[in-house]
């Protein structure tokens, strides 16, 4: 058996399926994995508290693509709730493999790869964070490490976008790790314990929402792990600024250079963050292509519009809510509109509006050729 096939059989690709926001992203990610890696073990983890919000069409899609959805208890693990913590809870779940590669759900696998290229016993694998989202002040790092009686590592890495020198600080959108340490502990348990202790320590400033990334290198040191520093092709951020003719020549050149670099990067894993980021790039038609080949929908706009139907869209409501809220002396008309918008916001928070979703989806979203 080939080495890459052996490693694929011993590696799990995992991600979070959090309905309704990550349903379409989960479909795209799973479909992209199966395009290039038909046999690797794949698990999507859904908060157990949202099991009733999981559309049956998605469960069928996972089953048809030889992947499973497992449920994880998220309620009360972090207080207050911390959605990024779901990846730590998912990482802790038991799997029949020795290695795990966690992917943020807003990523796509762009080509086949051999997990053995990045996953090794006694190591994590991750790409540098793009910039100092946390820890720009050097005094911040000791506050996280001293909780565990550890010194800040002397080694430094270059952050991906700014090239700034930093103690090990990784983007947690793509994280690979050996499941077990040399002394038999589970790395994911150490990562979770580290995050919870840091979260409880008021001396660690600005820990939310970066807690998962702050805890990762600390957990690595507690576990006695080293790290493989991934090239940007393993976690290529697609975010960029559009070239606007109103910008000066210098800005246009800088923005165009970023776009040109993204278009020629040939990533293994693309991290698009939001779907609009792909539209200006050479990958603009990719999500439509994936959906048309793997589902009954012909485009991202098709699956999105048929998922939401006539239900109000949170992306339309929240900006209006915040705009009206900022107005101190509202007119009677503005007061009435604010009451309406506030009521819709509360319906989103309670899940009432989301229960209207999927009404325009067919009973199966699999392509007709598969259903036959």
Image (tube, rainbow, N blue to C red):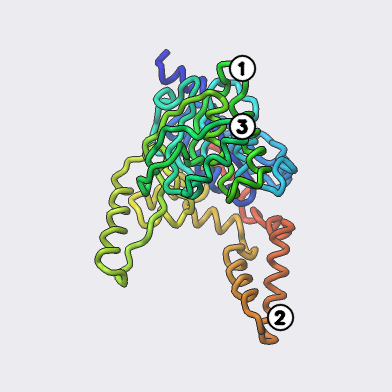
SS class, disc 1: loop
Of 56 and 74, nearer the camera is 74
Front disc: 1 or 2: 1
Front disc: 1 or 3: 3
Could you tell me which residue is drawn at 54 percent across and 53 percent down?
303
Nearer-N-terminus badge (1/2): 1
Decide if residue 372 is in sight here: no
How far across and down, in percent of the image, does residue 338 sit?
68, 76
Residue 5 appears left or right of 92: left
Residue at mark 1? 184
Nearer-N-terminus badge (1/3): 3
SS class, disc 2: helix
Q: How many marks?
A: 3
Nearer-N-terminus badge (2/3): 3
Residue at mark 2? 336
Task: State the separation of the CA atoms marked 1 and 2.
Answer: 61 Å
Q: Quadrant of residue 2?
A: top left
Q: Which mark is residue 53?
A: none
SS class, disc 3: helix
Front disc: 2 or 3: 3
Position of 343 relative to 208 (above/below): below
Residue at mark 3? 148
């Amino acid at each position: 058996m080939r080495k890459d096939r052996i490693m694929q059989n011993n590696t799990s690709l995992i991600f979070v399926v959090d309905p309704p926001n990550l349903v379409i992203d989960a479909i795209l990610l799973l479909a992209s994995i199966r395009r290039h890696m038909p046999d690797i073990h794949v698990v999507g983890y859904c908060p157990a508290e949202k099991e009733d919000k999981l559309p049956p069409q998605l469960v069928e899609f996972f089953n048809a693509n030889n992947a499973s959805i497992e449920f994880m208890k998220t309620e009360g693990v972090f207080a207050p709730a911390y959605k990024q913590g779901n990846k730590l809870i998912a990482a802790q779940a038991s799997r029949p493999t020795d290695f795990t590669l966690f992917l943020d759900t807003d990523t796509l696998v762009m080509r086949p790869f051999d997990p053995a290229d990045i996953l090794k016993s006694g190591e994590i694998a991750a790409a540098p964070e793009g910039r100092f989202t946390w820890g720009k002040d050097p005094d911040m790092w000791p506050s996280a490490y001293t909780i565990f009686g550890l010194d800040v590592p002397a080694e430094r890495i270059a952050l991906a976008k700014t090239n700034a020198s930093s103690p090990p600080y990784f983007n947690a959108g793509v994280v690979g790790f050996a499941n077990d340490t040399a002394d038999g502990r589970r790395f994911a348990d150490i990562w979770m314990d580290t995050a919870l202790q840091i979260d409880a320590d008021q001396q660690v400033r600005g820990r939310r929402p970066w807690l998962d990334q702050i805890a990762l290198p600390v957990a690595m040191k507690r576990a006695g792990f080293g790290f493989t520093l991934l090239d940007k092709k393993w976690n290529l951020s697609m975010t960029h600024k559009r070239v606007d003719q109103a910008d000066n020549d210098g800005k246009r050149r800088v923005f165009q250079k970023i776009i040109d670099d993204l278009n020629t990067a040939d990533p293994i894993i693309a991290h698009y963050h939001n779907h609009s980021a792909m539209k200006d790039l050479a990958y603009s038609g990719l999500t439509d292509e994936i959906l048309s080949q793997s589902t009954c929908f012909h485009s991202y706009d098709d699956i999105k519009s048929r998922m939401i139907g006539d239900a109000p869209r949170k992306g339309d409501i929240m900006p209006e809510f915040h705009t009206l809220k900022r107005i101190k002396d509202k007119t009677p008309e503005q007061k009435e509109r604010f009451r309406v918008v506030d009521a819709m916001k509360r319906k989103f928070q309670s899940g009432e509006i989301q229960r209207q979703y999927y009404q325009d989806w067919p009973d199966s979203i699999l392509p007709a050729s598969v259903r036959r």
